[in-house]
Image (spheres, rainbow, N blue to C red):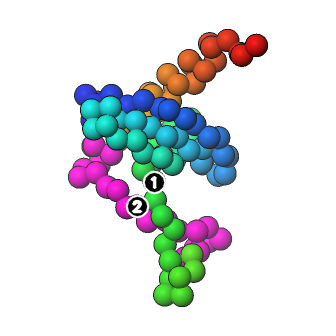
Amino acid sequence: MSKIEIEVLEFRPLQRNTLQGFATIRIGALRLRIRDVAIHESHAKRWAQLPAKPMLDSNRQAVVKDNKVQYSPFLLFDTQAVTEAFSTSVIRALDAFEAKANTEPLPA
């Protein structure tokens, strides 16, 4: 995964528990954009998760456990190593995106 370049196109902050916000990313080699990649942080560690959908019960109501809506992934990598490489690449791209945003002059 580290050989595939990932670019963050947008980041929307939203702080809730470990969630820090959502990124829109682009994987250039695949000509693919993925919206709503979740960015999390806990205990000085950050990671990225592919989008997921809320789990629904038989009445089409969100499944809630411990007062939290449960989510189910709909995109999966084949191995944990690839999942971690993707996450590392997204966080690296997010750091570059934020650094660029902090150095660009504000519009007049």
Between disc 2 and disc 1, whose residue precedes? 1
Q: Residues within 10 Å of mark 1 (few under 14, many from 20)?
A: some
Task: Indicate whether 59 appears above or below 85.
Answer: below
Pinpoint residue 107: horizontal percent, then vertical percent: 71, 16
Pinpoint residue 87: horizontal percent, then vertical percent: 40, 39
The mark found on residue 51 in the picture is: 1
Residue under the image location 66 percent in, 46 percent down: 14
Which quarter of the image is occupied by the C terminus? top right
Amino acid beneath label 1: Pro
Q: Is residue 50 left or right of residue 18?
A: left
- CA gap, disc 2 and disc 1: 7 Å
Residue under the image location 33 percent in, 45 percent down: 83
Residue under the image location 59 percent in, 48 percent down: 19
Which residue has dot 2 on it?
Answer: 73
Does the CB distance between marks 2 and 1 fall below 8 Å? no
Q: Please, which residue is most extreme toward the right here? A: 108
Q: Is residue 102 magenta?
A: no
Query: Residue 79 or 104: which is nearer the viewer?
Result: 104
- As helix, strand or loop, the secondary structure at mark 1 comes to loop
- As helix, strand or loop, the secondary structure at mark 2 comes to strand
On the question of residue 68 being in view, the answer is yes
Residue under the image location 45 percent in, 54 percent down: 51
Pinpoint residue 50: horizontal percent, then vertical percent: 42, 50
Q: Is residue 76 left or right of residue 62?
A: left
Q: Please, which residue is most extreme toward the bottom here? A: 59
Q: Which residues are magenta?
A: 63-83
Query: Residue 51 or 83: which is nearer the viewer?
Result: 51
When asked about the image quadrant of residue 65, the answer is: bottom right
Amino acid beneath label 2: Pro
Which quarter of the image is occupied by the N terminus? top left
